[in-house]
Image (cartoon, helix red, strand yellow):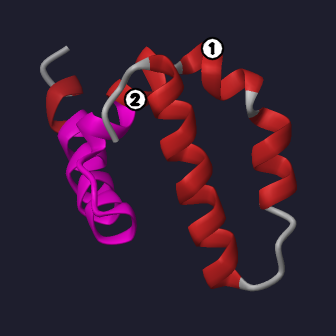
């Protein structure tokens, strides 16, 4: 069991850095949003799939961000 914590840290620290660079958010914040709003995100799955079909990467990123913020507001989490 002693090896488990260093292994988790090796995975979490780079992942957290990547999340902060790509989404400008900490990994803990993203996990909290997903846990708190799981039901709402599941209900919006088809909307996310439709938005993911947008060809232009900038428009797709903006649309995903708007949709994510809408879902978070629906479940009471401040984006």
Secondary structure type for disc 1: helix
- Judge from the rendering whether residue 35 lies leftward or rightward of residue 7; answer left or right: right
Q: Position of residue 49 (x, y in %)?
A: 83, 49
Q: Which quadrant of the figure contains the N terminus?
A: top left
Q: Which residue is mark 1?
A: 39
- Which residue is at a point 27% across and 54% down the rendered structure image? 25
Secondary structure beneath label 2: helix
Residue hosting label 2: 33
Q: Give above or below for 72 relative to 48.
A: above
Task: Tell me the magenta residue range.
Answer: 7-31
Residue 46 image-quadrant placement: top right
For the residue carrying disc 1, how many other residues have a C-alpha within 10 Å: few (<14), some (14-19), or many (20+)?
few
Q: How far from the left and from the top, in percent, is residue 5? A: 16, 27
Q: Is residue 77 above or below residue 52?
A: above
Label 2 Cα crowd, 10 Å radius (few <14 / some 14-19 / many 20+): some
Q: Which mark is residue 11?
A: none
- Main SS, magenta residues: helix
46 in relation to 3, above or below = below
Answer with mark 1 or mark 2, whichever residue precedes in sequence: 2
Assess whether residue 11 is covered by the magenta stretch. yes
């Amino acid at each position: 069991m002693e090896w488990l914590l260093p292994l988790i840290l090796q995975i979490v620290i780079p992942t957290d850095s990547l999340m902060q660079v790509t989404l400008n958010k900490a990994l803990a914040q993203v996990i909290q949003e997903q846990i708190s709003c799981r039901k709402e995100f599941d209900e919006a799955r088809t909307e996310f799939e439709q938005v993911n079909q947008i060809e232009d990467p900038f428009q797709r990123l903006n649309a995903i961000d708007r949709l994510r913020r809408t879902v978070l507001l629906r479940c009471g989490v401040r984006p």
